[in-house]
Image (spheres, helix red, strand yellow):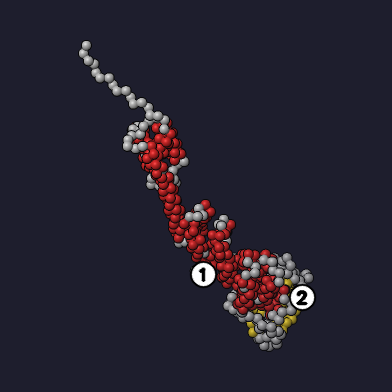
């Protein structure tokens, strides 16, 4: 019988259990390179370890601020643990590839544990630096936003200022130990000077709202980040409110009341608040002086406006010492007293209706004023000039009397007031003529028409003495009469006796 193939050698018998060998394989597998499998000549398992480590490196590198998802390191750690356990079980009865023995493998496994540990530490440092760079990038973008906002009006930039402040706050609060957080105080100083730049440019009215906004920053930003900046806007805002109010007071803009009121409410003990009353007093004094200038009526109107607005400020600001109320009273009295100068100016400008009303009001309210008598004369002359404009060419004087007698009779059923002006100005009333009636148009159409010519009638009359010159007369009905005032221009000469006659037609007429 021919010989057959030689028998196959039997598989090497399992090695006796060796705990140190199992531990060495497990430690080598924990390095992430599957070296324990290499010593056991399990190449597929070793390759799986290399693939897992490679995938981890691809996913993890380069390190960024977001870091790895928690599942990635957890999964990798679980994989290494499985490899270690599996390697330990396999190495318990499997001899190691020569010439490496269990003691050397154990030592090598301990040394190689530094690889994953060191890698984890290196990655943590890289991740921390990535976070720092991301925070510094956010800080820089916030700085750019502040710089850009500083080139726009505050109202348009306010939301962007808020966005930048939110970034500073987040970095300071949630990343307190970062390099970026240590730079926040310097950035806040720049932030404050940028937001409040209008104050530095002495644009006080424009500075008010930004400074008010800055006073709200400590409500959200940690005080330790702000330091002295927490009080930075206060004195500036007080000054801005005063200067803005003073500008509006000088220009006639009524917003000065709001500015001064805000100042007195918010900073009542500030140096700026102490300047409010002197500024108001100065405005009143300046306007009082303007009553004697070219526009007295405007000055009077401003004084009355000051009276009202200073009184409003006094009530709203808690005027405990009464200084504002005193200034208001002074403005009111000066405005009333300035009515005389205003009426004179209106008269000279030919605004006779306004002059009459102004002078009548002045005379009624100033019974003991030295100008009251002349104001009454101007009111009369202004009313005459409304009908006879030539009568208003000269301002009436306080002169009275004259050498020429003028008798005025009333041939009208209406009570009348006789106004006259010229070298002498005055007025008087005459009762209506009992039994007299209004003349028809036909009566007045004939050349023989002569009112006040009935010798049998006792006409109400009055005789006055006037000087030589032109005197202007106006006869106007009293009460509810609808008759039209009549007028006459009398050129009086010495040696004559004059008679004025008032009568009624479809309108009130006159003659002499």
| Drawn side of residue 313 relative to residue 114, left or right | right
Which is nearer the eye, 493 or 42? 42
Up-down: is 55 above or below 419?
above
Image quarter (top left, top right, bottom left or bottom right) of the C terminus: bottom right
* Residue 267 coordinates in the image, percent (x, y): 63, 66
Nearest to N terminus: mark 1 or mark 2 = 1
| Drawn side of residue 430 relative to residue 101, left or right | right
Disc 1 designates what residue? 202
* Residue 364 coordinates in the image, percent (x, y): 72, 73
Tell me the residue at 38%/45% (across/down).
61
Crowd around label 2: few <14 · some 14–19 · many ≥20 (10 Å): some
- Where residue 257 sits, quadrant-wise, is bottom right
Image quarter (top left, top right, bottom left or bottom right) of the N terminus: top left
Tell me the residue at 67%/71% (across/down).
324
The label number, if any, that marks residue 508 in the structure image: none
* Residue 343 coordinates in the image, percent (x, y): 64, 75
Instruction: Report the mark closest to the observer, 1 or 2.
Output: 1
**Residue 357 visible in the shown view:** no
Up-down: is 369 above or below 148?
below
Residue at the left extreme?
Answer: 2
- Where residue 421 sits, quadrant-wise, is bottom right
Check disc 2 and report its element: helix, strand or loop. Answer: loop
- Where residue 501 sits, quadrant-wise, is bottom right
Gap in angstroms between the C-alphas marked 1 and 2:
74 Å
Disc 2 designates what residue? 460
Which is nearer the eye, 503 or 131? 131
Check disc 1 and report its element: helix, strand or loop. Answer: loop
* Residue 478 coordinates in the image, percent (x, y): 73, 69
């Amino acid at each position: 019988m021919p010989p057959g193939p030689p028998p196959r050698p039997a598989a090497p018998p399992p090695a006796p259990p060796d705990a140190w060998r199992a531990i060495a394989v497990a430690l080598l597998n924990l390095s992430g390179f599957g070296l324990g499998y290499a010593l056991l000549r399990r190449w597929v398992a070793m390759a799986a370890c290399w693939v897992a480590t490679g995938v981890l490196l691809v996913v993890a590198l380069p390190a960024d601020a977001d870091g790895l998802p928690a599942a990635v390191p957890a999964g990798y750690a679980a994989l290494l643990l499985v490899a270690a356990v599996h390697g330990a079980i396999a190495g318990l009865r499997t001899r190691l590839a020569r010439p490496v023995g269990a003691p050397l493998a154990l030592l090598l496994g301990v040394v190689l544990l530094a690889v994953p540990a060191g890698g984890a530490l290196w990655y943590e440092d890289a991740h921390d630096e990535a976070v720092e760079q991301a925070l510094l990038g956010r800080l820089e973008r916030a700085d750019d936003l502040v710089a850009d906002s500083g080139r726009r009006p505050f109202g348009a930039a306010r939301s962007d200022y808020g966005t930048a402040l939110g970034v500073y706050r987040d970095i300071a609060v949630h990343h307190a130990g970062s390099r970026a957080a240590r730079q926040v105080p310097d950035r806040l100083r720049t932030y404050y000077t940028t937001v409040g730049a209008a104050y530095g440019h002495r644009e006080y009215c424009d500075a008010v709202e930004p400074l008010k906004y800055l006073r709200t920053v400590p409500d959200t930003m940690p005080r330790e980040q702000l330091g002295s900046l927490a009080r930075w806007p206060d004195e500036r805002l007080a000054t801005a409110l005063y200067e803005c109010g003073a500008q509006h007071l000088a220009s006639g803009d009524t917003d000065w009341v709001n500015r001064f009121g805000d100042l007195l409410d918010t900073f009542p003990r500030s140096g700026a608040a102490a300047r409010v009353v002197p500024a108001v007093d100065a405005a009143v004094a300046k306007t009082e002086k303007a009553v004697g200038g070219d526009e007295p009526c405007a000055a009077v109107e401003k004084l009355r406006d000051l009276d009202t607005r200073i009184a409003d400020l006094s009530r709203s600001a808690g005027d405990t010492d009464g200084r504002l109320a005193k200034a208001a009273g002074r403005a009111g009295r000066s405005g009333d007293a300035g009515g005389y100068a205003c009426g004179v100016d209106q008269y000279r400008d030919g605004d006779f209706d306004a002059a009459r009303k102004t002078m009548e009001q002045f005379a009624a309210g100033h019974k003991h004023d030295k100008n009251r008598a002349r104001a009454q004369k101007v009111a009369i002359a202004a009313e005459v000039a409304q009908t006879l404009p030539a009568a208003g060419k000269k301002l009436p004087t306080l002169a009275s009397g004259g050498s020429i007698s003028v008798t005025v009779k009333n041939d009208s059923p209406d009570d009348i007031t006789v106004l006259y002006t010229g070298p002498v100005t005055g007025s008087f009333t005459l009762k209506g003529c009992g039994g007299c009636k209004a003349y028809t148009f036909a009566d007045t159409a004939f050349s023989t028409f002569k009112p006040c010519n009935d010798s049998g009638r006792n006409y109400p009359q009055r005789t006055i003495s006037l000087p030589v010159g032109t005197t202007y007369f106006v006869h106007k009905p009293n009460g509810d009469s609808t008759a039209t005032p009549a007028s006459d221009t009398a050129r009086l000469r010495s040696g004559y006796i004059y008679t004025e006659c008032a009568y009624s037609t479809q309108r009130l007429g006159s003659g002499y």
